[in-house]
Amino acid sequence: MDKNKKPGIYFEDIVLLESHVGDLQPENKLAFNLVLTSLNRQRKDVEDKLVVIATFDAFYEVEDPVLNFQCKFGAFYRHEEAANMDWEDFSNEHAVAHMIPYVREFISNITWRMPLPRLNLPPINAYRLIEEYKNWLREGTEES
């Protein structure tokens, strides 16, 4: 890949595909632990498109969470015919980094509408989320 050229990969959309919010316990302390709980990458060769779907849990393994909050986002990308970057060079970390602002806004927006303080997540490292997800998968495989 020529680093002096544009990659030729563009995102078309990032959308909320599913969410589960419930079991509100406003008397509990507002503490969060955002983790990635699933990640799926699908190529559409005919259309030269890529779809990355990620599920996030905002209160993963928090003791006595104020609520349960999971959300699934899809990122939809297209590839120019003469693109400089191949799909293989476009990492899952890129896609998750694109999704994070949408996840942060969604969590903030929904918690603002509840009888508890608004949850404004700090900056989130996509590479760390993916690495923790890979470790979580390895640990789950080792236990089986």
Image (tube, grey):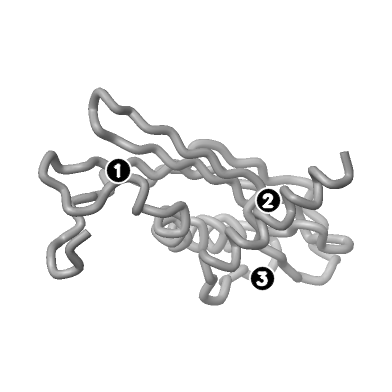
In percent of width and height, residue 5 lies at 13, 64
Q: Is mark 2 on a helix, strand or loop?
A: strand
User: Between residues 92 and 36, which one lies in front from this camera angle?
Assistant: 92
| Precedes in sequence: disc 2 or disc 3 | 2
- Mark 3 surroundings: few (<14), some (14-19) or many (≥20) residues within 10 A: few
| Type of amino acid at the residue the image marks with label 2 | Phe
Residue at label 2? 69
**Is label 1 in a helix, a strand or a loop?**
strand
**Residue at image mark 1:** 77
Q: In this view, does 5 lie to the left or right of 112?
A: left
Q: How many labels does the image show?
A: 3
Q: Where is residue 6 in the image (x, y as percent from the top left)?
A: 15, 61
Query: Can you identify the residue that label 3 sits on?
Result: 117
- Identity of the residue furthest to the top in this view: 46
The relative height of residue 35 versus residue 87 in the rendered view (above or below) is: below
What's the residue type where badge 3 is placed? Pro
Q: In this view, does 103 lie to the left or right of 27?
A: left
Q: Distance between the residues labelled 1 and 3?
A: 35 Å
